Amino acid sequence: MYILINFLYIFAGYKWGDWRNWKTYYPTILFFIIGDFLYNFLLYQKPMWLFHDVILPNHTTITVLAMVVSYSATVLIYLGRFPVSWKNRFLWFLLWTGVYLLLEFINNSLGFITYHNDWNFWWSVLFTGIIFFILPIHHKKPLLAWLLSIIIILSLLMIFDVRIDDMK
C-alpha cells in the first residue's frame, strides 16, 4: 500500500511540484522530516501510531520512505502552489489536510496504520491541521515555526503523559 502511495506522490511531485525553486523549499522539507524523525525517536517506546504493510517490512522503513518521498513532494506542491488570497489559502489548506486524512482513514480501515496510547483519528485530524498550518509559517518565519512546534510538542507530551522514561 505505501509503495503505491509513494508512487502517487512521486507522480504528483513531478507533475505539480515547484522543482525550479526546490532550494527555497529545502529547509521546510527538512523541518517536516525532522518533526517526524523526532516523533519516531522520542516515542520509540510509546508510539502513538504505527504503520504496517504487506510488502515493506516495518514501521521504520515505511516512515523513512514517507520522509524522503511524500514529505518532499508535499512541500514542493503545497508551498510551490500556495495561493495569494486568504480564501484560496484556506481552501488549499483544507484540500491538503483532507488528502492526508483521507489516506490515513483508508489506511486505518485496512489495518495499515494502528493507533496506540490513546491516540485516535480525531487526534490525527488536529495534528494534520497543525502540520499544514505550520509549513507555510516555517517557509516564511522558520524561528516562529520552531517555537510553535516546541510548544505543540511539549503540550502533546503532557496530554499523552509521555515521560522521559518512556523515551528511547
Image (cartoon, rainbow, N blue to C red):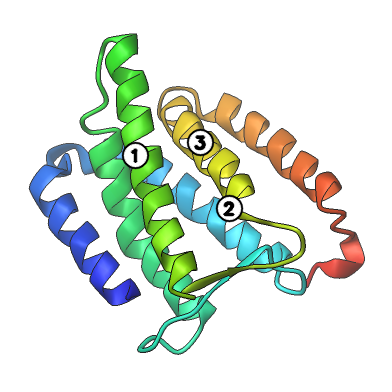
Residue sitting at 59 percent across and 24 percent down? Answer: 144
Q: Residue at x 70, y 37 (%)?
A: 152
Residue at (85%, 68%) from the top-left corner? 166
Left or right: where does residue 123 sit relative to residue 76?
Answer: right
Q: Quadrant of the N terminus?
A: bottom left
Q: Can you tell which quarter of the image residue 93 is in?
A: top left
| Left or right: residue 48 compared with residue 155 | left
Crowd class of label 1 (few under 14; some 14 to 19; many from 20; radius 10 Å)? some
**Neighbour class for label 3 at 10 Å: few (<14), some, many (≥20)?**
some
Identify which amino acid the numbered label 1 is placed on.
Trp
Residue 87 in percent (x, y) is at 32, 12
Q: Position of residue 77 (x, y in %)?
A: 23, 40
Position of 135 with respect to 17 (left or right) is right
Q: Measuring from the top left, give residue 122's x and y in whole percent.
A: 61, 46
The part of the image, by quadrant, that contains residue 68 is bottom left
The kind of residue tagged 3 is Gly
Residue behind mark 3:
129
| CA gap, disc 3 and disc 1 | 9 Å
Mark 2 touches mark 1? (CB < 8 Å): no
Secondary element type, mark 3: helix
What residue do we see at 64% from left, 37% from top?
149
User: What residue is pinned by disc 2?
Assistant: 121
- Please identify the residue farthest to the front as the structure is shown: 109
Closer to the chain start, of discs 2 and 3, is 2
Is 44 situated left or right of 31 in this image?
Answer: right
| Residue placed under numbered mark 1 in the picture | 96
User: Measured along the vertical axis of the image, is residue 10 above or below residue 73?
Assistant: below
- The image position of residue 106, as x and y in percent, is 40, 62
- Residue 113 drawn above or below residue 14: below
Q: Nearer the viewer, residue 50 or 66?
A: 50
Sequence order check, earlier mark of 2 and 1 = 1
Q: Pointer 2 and pointer 3: residues touching (CB < 8 Å)?
A: no
